[in-house]
Amino acid sequence: MRLRTPSVAGLLAVALLAAWSCQNPCASTSPCPTPTPGGTPGACTNVAGSRNAFWSDSCGRSGSGTMVIAQSGCTFTATFTGLGTFSGTVSGSTLNYTLTFADPCSGTATGTATISGATVSGTFSGTESGLGCCNSTSVTGNITFQFPPTPAITVTPTTTTTPG
């Protein structure tokens, strides 16, 4: 019986696959943000889809949930649950956006966020008022959303009776 030793090419392929999988934090069913259109100068990153979203502001308010981002070219729009409408542009891997606060709050804020791997995070500042809101001349805050999205389907265990 003769033992075969792995080829250098085979070992190299396994090493490259392992290195790639360590750098790809997104599930195969939900791709990471990707440049669009295909790496051309001035391209923007595609951030569209269902995303896990988190936010907090200087008034002590915070929230989380799933937001759905729609994107056309380098322009996007979404709704942050409990915060408001989030819209703006993507330039490379930077988002410049405006928040329009949702009821019971009113006002607007602008901000910038950066894509880093599977996470987009940024800050905003503006004015906000309303019952239970800042009611001040200024508000600052943080936003984060992540890839992959929260699973759309939740499985609930059930009891099955087998006829005996």
Image (cartoon, grey):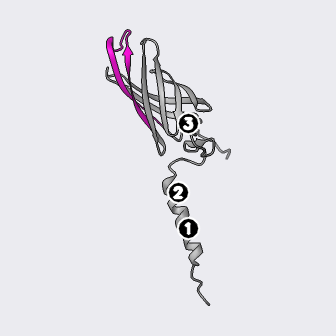
* Label ID, residue 14: 1
Residue 122 inside the magenta-drawn segment: yes
* Label ID, residue 21: 2
Q: Which residue is mark 3?
A: 47
Residue 60 in view in this figure: yes
Disc 2 residue type (three-letter): Ser
The reply to whether dot 3 and dot 2 touch (C-beta < 8 Å) is no
The reply to whether dot 1 and dot 2 touch (C-beta < 8 Å) is no
Q: CA distance from mark 3 to mark 2?
A: 21 Å
Residue farthest top in this picture? 131
SS for dot 1: helix
Residue at 38 percent across and 19 percent down: it is 126
* Label ID, residue 130: none
Residue at 42 percent across and 36 percent down: it is 121
Q: Position of residue 68 (x, y in %)?
A: 56, 29
Q: Nearer the viewer, mark 3 or mark 2?
A: 3
Q: Position of residue 93 (x, y in %)?
A: 50, 40
Disc 3 residue type (three-letter): Val
Give the magenta part as a residue range. 120-145
The disc, 3 or 2, on the residue closer to the chain's N-terminal end is 2
Classify residue 99 as left or right of residue 36: left
Q: Position of residue 92 (x, y in %)?
A: 52, 39
